Image (cartoon, grey):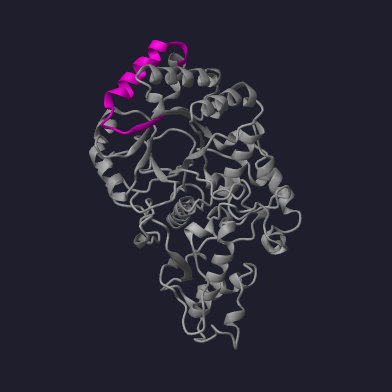
Amino acid sequence: MDGWSLGAFVGVSFGTAVSNLPRPEHVCDLLTSMGVDHVRLYDASSDTLAAFAGSGIRVLVALPNNAIHSVAASPAAAAAWLKNNVLAFLPNTNITGIVVGDAVLTGYPIAAPLLVPAMRSLHRALVHAGRLDRSIKITSAHSSTILMGAFPPSRAFFNLSFADAVLAPMLDFLAATDSYFLLDLDPLAIYEQSASITPIEYALFQPNRGAIDATTQLNYTNLFDAIVDAALSAMAAMNHTDVPLVIGAAGWPWKGESPDATIEKAEIFNTNLVEHVLTNRASPMRPGLEVDTYIHELYSEDRKSGGDGGRLWGLFHANQTPVYKLDVSGVTMLRDSSTGNGSIAKTWCVARSGASDADLESALNWACGIGNADCSAIQQGGACYSPDSVASHASYAFNSYFQRNVQGNGTCDFNGCATLTSTDPSYNSCIYSSGSVNSIIPQNSTATPSSSSSSSLNSFPAGLERVILLTAFALVGF
């Protein structure tokens, strides 16, 4: 995107099992207006692909589970599918990938032995079509339920039922073809497995104590990062650190049977997810790693079959009105366009205008206590004590926490009480520390946290890590 120097992107998934589905050209117009330039389709609808012509949007198309057998068994079938669903729309529609199957290993296991052969067959068809394999990559989408022992992340591994038979040759294929591993996850469902012992803030990227991986001593302050690093560890255990990880679907339902399926929580999760991904903070194990991510989903697929608990995920209603406000593109994130290289401007975290004093005071107490922010300057006699107001003191504490913890995946939210700004809030002798996204993720970061990171302030209560190891990260996919 214009002016954005970081590599990771946030895209959107789009399924068509929607009542009163808008016309494909209107879907394309909506995505363009949102600044979305990556979309994952759950099918290969000819009308949709034709509508995306000339838009520049990078499109992933899907080979459905029920077509895997024929494509794996017959080169002619693979070539025919490619001709009808991909070649017919090139080059006007920018198709960049083919997702072979959706959660085959856990949801359609009868096709599991044919999954890699189908991927190879389509790859050969791309090669024979004029070396299109250079611009169109083949992958497959997996539910995060394929991960076992997901906490601590450093010890995670793939389900042994299909690790050697399917995932080992698949990873070899992905590495050989410069493709990527596609993982889908449902953060709310994962959180619900351990809701009695895990704070909701952990699932929503909000301030919390986190949990320490005893092997790496890395502190995980959100569920998303733990799953990302668990997947990376599982791939590394199979001798593949050379295959990029892409999150094919992540989101939060705004309606459903769960009491946590609310518009407010969906907005919080997805807003924080966008910021997290675009600033390359998704992997404590590999700081600065780009983890491209697709938000699930553009419209709620209310006609989709399956036990989804009546959940609705869509960012928009079918009438094109937003369910809640979300900047998927990151355009409103702070940028310094004057540098000429799209680098991110200096940023500060301050109290949000309109937040109540009661909420600010609660967040202030957390930041100066459990959050371990440096609040000495707002004590009586300190350089930032005056003006003696909750909002002023909260701004200083929020910023101290943010600047101290952003390398460790801290966020500027505080339950909606805080916001980022590019305007220096310093005044007189009260100086706010600052940082930029480019400096937030130093390329030579060590994986070992500071001594304070291993303190009780940044870990769950004694014994809880063992419980989490057993239950808290039982992974549930879409």
Pick the front one: 155 or 268: 155
Q: Position of residue 450 (x, y in %)?
A: 68, 60
Query: Residue 147 occupies which quadrant of the picture?
Result: top right
Q: Is residue 207 magenta?
A: no
The residue lying at 44 percent from left, 58 percent from top is 264
Extreme right residue here?
463
Q: Is residue 86 magenta?
A: yes
Please indicate, yes or no, whether residue 67 appears anywhere in the rendered image. Answer: no
Extreme bottom residue here?
381
Query: Residue 303 occupies which quadrant of the picture?
Result: top left
The residue lying at 40 percent from left, 59 percent from top is 333
Magenta stretch bounds: 72-98
Q: Position of residue 279 (x, y in %)?
A: 48, 53
Pick the front one: 258 or 405: 405
* As drawn, 320 above or below 423: above
Query: Residue 136 occupies which quadrant of the picture?
Result: top left
The residue lying at 55 percent from left, 55 percent from top is 442
